[in-house]
Amino acid sequence: MKTLKRIEIYKSTAEKVFKCLDDLGVTGMHMTKSSMPMMGGKLNLDFLTEHHTGLGSKYRWTGKVVGMIMDFTVEVTKWINGKEKIWGTIGAPKLILYAWFKMQLIVSPSPNGTQAELFISYEKPSGWFYRLLSFFLADWYCVWCLKNMLGDCKKSLEGES
């Protein structure tokens, strides 16, 4: 298993930062748009639970990237409002660069506002082709996702002021 981490400081309260980073309408949108890191593909998001945030919330991502099917369900397994969230794939995910992934968000006060630490952990997929893709692209894609999630939240919070 490999874990990557990125930290961002926000000039906002911990409650607002957590709420923003917990909102897939903000932090998941980089995967719903065709882009170079998505290799021209995009994913669709469907909520599987009535509540879109909080412990036990589930959502499913589906779509194609370079003609390969992506279909994975994610469940929130830890959720402490304003402080911490853990979520990851469940079942048998159809991913390209990973066998599965788990993410963790930790929000805490800092001298300059609020600090958000965002982690992604993953296992490499099986099969030589997918392992080769993972070797070259998984870390780069993880960093792109972490950067987009934290950056989109920053833009959203700055838009409130």
Image (cartoon, grey):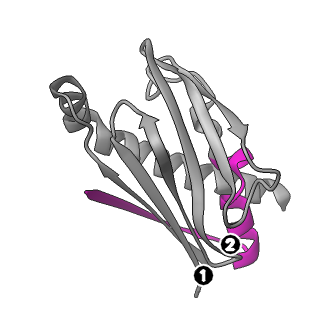
How many numbered circles are shown? 2
Quarter assignment of residue 81: bottom right
Quarter assignment of residue 94: top left
Q: Residues within 10 Å of mark 1 (few under 14, many from 20)?
A: few
Measuring 38% from the left and 39% from the top, which residue is drawn there? 141
- What amino acid type is highlighted by mark number 1? Asn
Asked whether 141 falls inside the magenta stretch, the response is no
**Nearer to us in this view, 99 or 82:** 99
Magenta span of residues: 1-27
| Residue 101 to residue 31: above or below | below
Task: Locate residue 51, reporting x and y percent.
Answer: 80, 56
Q: Secondary structure at mark 2?
A: loop
Are dots 1 and 2 in contact, CB under 8 Å?
yes
The residue singled out by tag 2 in the image is: 11
| Residue 102 to residue 69: above or below | below
Asked whether the viewer can see residue 69, the reply is yes
Asked whether 23 falls inside the magenta stretch, the response is yes
Task: Locate residue 36, reporting x and y percent.
Answer: 45, 23
Residue 105 in the figure: left or right of residue 127: right
Mark 1 vs mark 2: which is more N-terminal?
A: 2
The residue singled out by tag 1 in the image is: 112
Measuring 74% from the left and 65% from the top, which residue is drawn there? 19
Measuring 49% from the left and 65% from the top, which residue is drawn there? 104
**Nearer to us in this view, 31 or 59:** 59
Image quarter hosting the C terminus: bottom right
Residue 3 in the figure: left or right of residue 145: left
Asked whether the viewer can see residue 13, the reply is no
Q: Mark 1 to mark 2: distance in Å?
A: 7 Å
